[in-house]
Amino acid sequence: MARRTFHRAPEAERRHDLIEATLDCIAEYGLEGATVRQIAIKAGVTAGLIRHYFQSKEHILQEAYRVVIARLTEKAERVSGDAETRLRDFIVINLTEPVANSRSLSLWASFISRVSVDPELAAIHREGYLSFRDTLEHLLADFLSTQGADSSPERCRRLAIAINGLLDGLWLEGCLAGELFGDSELVEIALTSIETLLGISLKLVDAPRADG
Amino acid sequence: MARRTFHRAPEAERRHDLIEATLDCIAEYGLEGATVRQIAIKAGVTAGLIRHYFQSKEHILQEAYRVVIARLTEKAERVSGDAETRLRDFIVINLTEPVANSRSLSLWASFISRVSVDPELAAIHREGYLSFRDTLEHLLADFLSTQGADSSPERCRRLAIAINGLLDGLWLEGCLAGELFGDSELVEIALTSIETLLGISLKLVDAPRADG
DNA sequence: TAAGAAATTGTTCAAGCGTATAATAGTGTC
DNA sequence: GACACTATTATACGCTTGAACAATTTCTTA
């Protein structure tokens, strides 16, 4: 039988492709659909190659989870401008594409369901979560103090927990059933709710630039 | 070989036990750990019996998901008393045991990750979600109107979406990393945040009775 | 250009999967 | 108390899984 054509790729590219294929499988068929063979087919290689790059299936899943978390948080953590703009952009980014879509949720939920089972995934999760909330807490502290409002650590902590929860929940609702909401309804609800929680109104500005 | 002892149970009880065993398996090992054989072992029966009660593995999972949703929502939907008490109890119930614990989250996340893959699960999910938000919307409308506040449908809808999101998000945070928060910190944060969102303070009352 | 190292393929294996079905053991009925 | 009924066990089947490994191709470099 004719052997398939043989393409040798740089290590970084191949690893990236394999992880990407893993995410595709999970998004399409769930964690159980991400078998070594399916991943290989998706990546256009044979199953054996995966073991060449990853010690085991567990390891490729862990790498994949790191990528998922990074994609969910990196955009929001790179906001720039004055304190108000950064806070506002942070909110908007987390509730619009590409952070908020059903694929993201699918991936996130698949891994979350294993966080309580797999200690390695739990560690990866905790790191991402704390870093995200920390970013939010700093944004709040900066914004509140520039507005001359109470920015005590205790208040910032509580606000960060509440607003983080609100964003998580709205993100979830939007991803799970986006068609139940108007075009930018969730973003508007988030912004006005957070204004109310802070007791300060966020002035209207353009949508954040979608640069990388 | 000696045949194992043979216990014949009433249909309802056996179905219940099998579903319970399924949930145990999922909570402990994730969806992929819920194999027909594992479920059977957990339930103390042989694998074949599962097919006697459920047409296929898909079917037992669907039934199990219905049970999960019911447990997450039924307590909160049965609040009683005046409008303020009902709203307050609704909030507290959703953020304390047994609704808020890591097992609940584990189960919820396992199924959520398949909602986007399995249309049957998606239907079950949507029904539960809409019913939950509807309950909250009515609680808000009742409470706002007894307080003489604006209770227009538009305002109630937006508040229900925001507060539902907030509760979902805090529930998630509490389940995933309860030890990061003080004893009833999340409940307090939820209550004060919701007071702020409504512009009305919820008077202090005892914790809701834990009756069935 | 030959040799050795590394990447990739193709094949194999034991274990576990969901499902099907035949045999057995309780239950209720006349 | 025999008989039908069905809940339950036990076993078997075909398939997929993660993993292991030998064979093959490409790359590097001397």
Image (spheres, coloured by chain):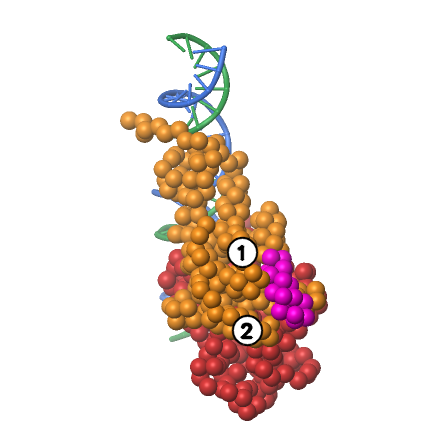
Chain colours: A orange, B red, C green, D blue
Residue type highlighted by circle 1? Ser
Q: Chain of mark 2?
A: A
Q: Where is residue B57 drawn, in percent x and y?
A: 42, 57
The answer to which quarter of the image holds residue B85 is: bottom right
Q: Position of residue B202 (x, y in %)?
A: 63, 83
Q: What separation in Å lies between label 2 and label 1 (alpha carbons)?
A: 19 Å
Residue A93 visible to an observer of this rendering: yes
Q: Which residue is mark 2?
A: A201
**Relative to A95, residue B204 above or below:** below
The residue range painted magenta reads: A134-151
**Is residue A68 in the magenta section?**
no
Q: Which mark is residue A80?
A: 1
The reply to the same-chain question for discs 2 and 1 is: yes
Residue appearing at x 32%, y 29% in the figure: A4
In the rendered image, which quarter contains the C terminus of chain B? bottom right
In the image, taking residue B88 as reference, residue B161 lies left or right, namely left
